[in-house]
Image (spheres, helix red, strand yellow):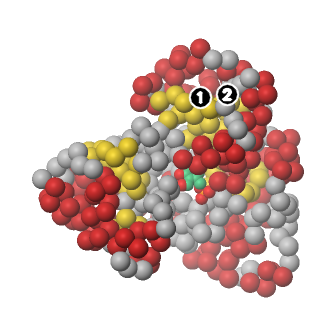
Amino acid sequence: MGKQAHGGNLVWAAALAGCSPSAILDFSASISPLGPPGSVLAAIESQLNNIQHYPDPNYSDLRNTLSHFHQLPSEWIMPGNGSAELLTLAGRDLAGLSANLGATVLITPAFGDYYRALAAYEANVLEFSLFSADSLGLLNFQLSAISTHTSGLLLNNPHNPTGRLFRREEIIPLVDKFALVVVDEAFMDFLPPEEEQSLLGAVQDYPNLVILRSLTKFYSLPGLRLGYAVGSPQRLQRWQSWRDPWSVNCFATAAGVAAIQDQEFQQQTWSWLPQARQQLFDGLVKIPGLTPWNSTANFLLVESEYSCEHLQEQLLKKYKILIRDCHSFPELGDRFFRVAVRTTSENKLLLTALQGVVGNQE
Ligand SMILES: Cc1ncc(COP(=O)(O)O)c(C=O)c1O
């Protein structure tokens, strides 16, 4: 089993740690430790009798629930088999711009799956580093060199792996410029309503804007696969015609309805995250040679004076703890790692383990 390109490769980690995958404490995948919510598990169980039928290809229940939740017409919403499936469809739309000599601008470091989705349809990719621009305003200026009106932009907000949040006002001028803007808001739900910077409210004003959302991180459902796209009905109908009619199964649709309606779980997550993230941040700052970056999401990017590949191996072998190395982000390489924010007691285990392995490096 090869090394992971994504977080959460427990089979690979367990082979190195010499234990079963379930014995690994996984900080590499940015999944909430609080879920899945009981309401979602009950909804999944309730579907057992439905596996003898095809799912409703219109996903009406889930789309109506999301429509009510976001105050948007249901024709503007399309569920997917994880946001990764929708990213592939977005990749096809973005690649289509190449016919008019357009390119797709990627803000780097970028989530590895963006490269996959764009390469699948041979999109012409132009990379712009977040580190050199340091603000989307400056990026806007750099972009004056390319024909944005025939090009696309794929942006992630909050940004993985840095955890940085772009404000709506920073993004809207880019939506005005580009032919197509896809904003991946896979981690936006971790921000409470008064802090989030989602562009969902702008979608009906901009037919060239598509938002991708995931339900796998906040509700701890990565194995179930569920996300949704929000965009113009014409675009979503085209996307629907490109894929198989039943790509979201009955368990995922029922889980989605229950999850979206579970306000208690949402409140619980919004109260847990700021404190747990601060606890982890403060603990990391105290470890010599490690510098965590401020984050608005449920993960922290950590700059390290030590080889992260080595730290990762030692943490696995000695503590059965998996952290995310950053080799799939070429700008970051071996001097950065990423960790999910987990429960207070699990965060303490990570901090103690890191102190142990860093102590041995000095
Ligand atoms: C930024 C980003 N977008 C999208 C995804 C895909 O999420 P999903 O499980 O909904 O396919 C991930 C998964 O790690 C991610 O990090």
Q: Position of residue 57 (x, y in %)?
A: 86, 63
From the top left corner, tell me how far across and down residue 90 is, in percent: 72, 43
Decide if ligand 1 comes within 8 Å of the CB at mark 2: no
Disc 1: which residue: 126
Kindly identify the residue that appears in the image at 63 percent across and 17 percent down: 146
Q: Residue furthest bottom?
A: 49
Mark 2 → mark 1, Cα distance in angstroms = 6 Å
Q: Which residue is nearer to you in this view: 158 or 243?
A: 243
Secondary structure found at label 2: loop
Q: Earlier in the sequence, mark 2 or mark 1?
A: 2
| In the depicted structure, whether residue 20 falls above or below residue 205 | below
Q: Is residue 243 above or below residue 126?
A: below
For the point 72% across and 57% down, which residue is it? Answer: 80
Q: Is residue 333 visible?
A: yes
Q: What residue is drawn where x is 49% and y is 68%?
A: 1
Secondary structure under badge 1?
strand
Relative horizontal placement of residue 202, taking residue 136 as reference (left or right): right
| Residue at 78% across, 34% down | 96
210 displayed left or right of 60: left
Q: Quadrant of residue 53?
A: bottom right
Q: Which residue is mark 2?
A: 103
Image height of 142 relative to 275, above or below: above
Q: Amino acid at mark 2?
A: Ala
Measured from the top left, where is residue 150 in percent x and y?
Answer: 73, 23
Judge the density around disc 2: few (<14), some (14-19), many (≥20) Cα neighbours within 10 Å: many
Dot 1 amino acid type: Leu
Pointer 1 local density, CA inside 10 Å: few below 14, some 14–19, many at least 20:
some
| Labels 2 & 1 near each other (Cβ < 8 A) | yes
Percent x, y for residue 260? 65, 62
